[in-house]
Amino acid sequence: MTLRAITQPATTGIVDYLFIGLHGWGANGADLAALGTYLNLPHYTKIFPDAPLPLPQVPGGCMWYDFPAGYDFRSSPQVEHQADLQATRQQLRDWIEATAAAMAVPLERTVVAGFSQGGAMAMDVALQLPLAAVLVLSGYLHSDPQPHQPSSPVFMVHGRLDPVVPIAAAHQARDRLQSLQVSVAYQEWDMGHEITLPVLQAIQEFCQGL
C-alpha cells in the first residue's frame, strides 16, 4: 500500500542504507523530515511517511491510531485490539517492505525510527522485520513486542522530564525488550517530549556505526 511521504535522497547518489522516520500522534511526515536535514548520513536515503489516518482536530495532522477516552500512559491500557491499529499495523509493514524493495535496499540495511506513537509502531511492527536497527524516541509499548529472530538492535532515547510519555514507560519498554533478548542501547536525557540537536547527533553516530 502507498503512504504519502517526504524523501530526502542520499547526497552521494549511492544508496547504501534506508532511514524511515515515523512521526507521532497529530503530526505528519514533515515534522520529522525537518529534523532529518540535520542528520549527516550521506549514504542514507531518508523517507518520512504520513500516518494513514487523519486527525481532524489538527490541520494536517495524522495518526497511526486514536487513543481511547481517558487514555493514560501511566496505566497503559491496551490498544492492540483496536480496529484502526490492526489496519495501520499491516499497512505499515507492507509499506516498509515495498519501500525497501522499490529503493533496492535490503531490509537488513533499513533503519526504522519512531517518535512517540511512531516509536510504539516501530517496536510493534518494525521489530518484526530483519532490519539493520530500530530507533525508539520518546516511545512506549502499546502491545507486547514480538521481535524477529535474530532481532534488530534497538537504540532508545527518552527524556527524564517528558510530560507526555513518562520515563517509566521507557523503562518498561527497555526492560521488556531486554527480557526478549533484544540488544538495547538506552539513553536518558534531561529533556521533555522532544528530539533535541544532541539527540540527533547521537542518532547520527549510531547510524554511522551500523
Image (cartoon, rainbow, N blue to C red):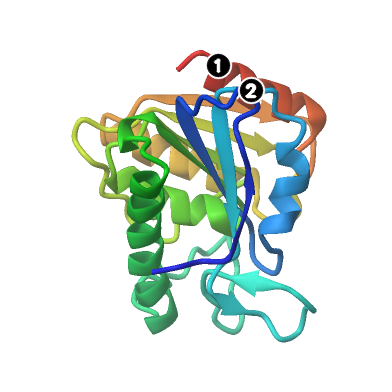
The reply to whether residue 77 is visible in this rendering is yes
Task: State yes or no: discs 2 and 1 in contact (Cβ < 8 Å).
Answer: yes
Instruction: Say which residue appears at 27% left-offset and 33% top-offset.
Output: 151
**Residue 54 sits above or below residue 140 on the image:** below
Which residue is more in the foreground, 203 or 3?
Answer: 3
Residue 1 in the image: above or below residue 145: below
- Residue 133 position (above or below residue 210): below
Disc 2/disc 1 C-alpha distance (Å): 6 Å
For the residue marked with disc 2, what is the amino acid?
A: Gln
Q: Which of the 4 quarters of the picture holds residue 197?
A: top right
Which residue is the site of mark 1?
208
Look at the numbered disc 1 and give the secondary structure of its residue. helix
Where in the figure is residue 113, as x and y percent of width and height? 53, 42
On-image quarter of the C terminus:
top left
Q: Report which residue position mark 2 lands on.
A: 204
Residue 125 seen in this snapshot: no
Q: Secondary structure at mark 2?
A: helix
Give me the residue at 80% from left, 79% from top.
59
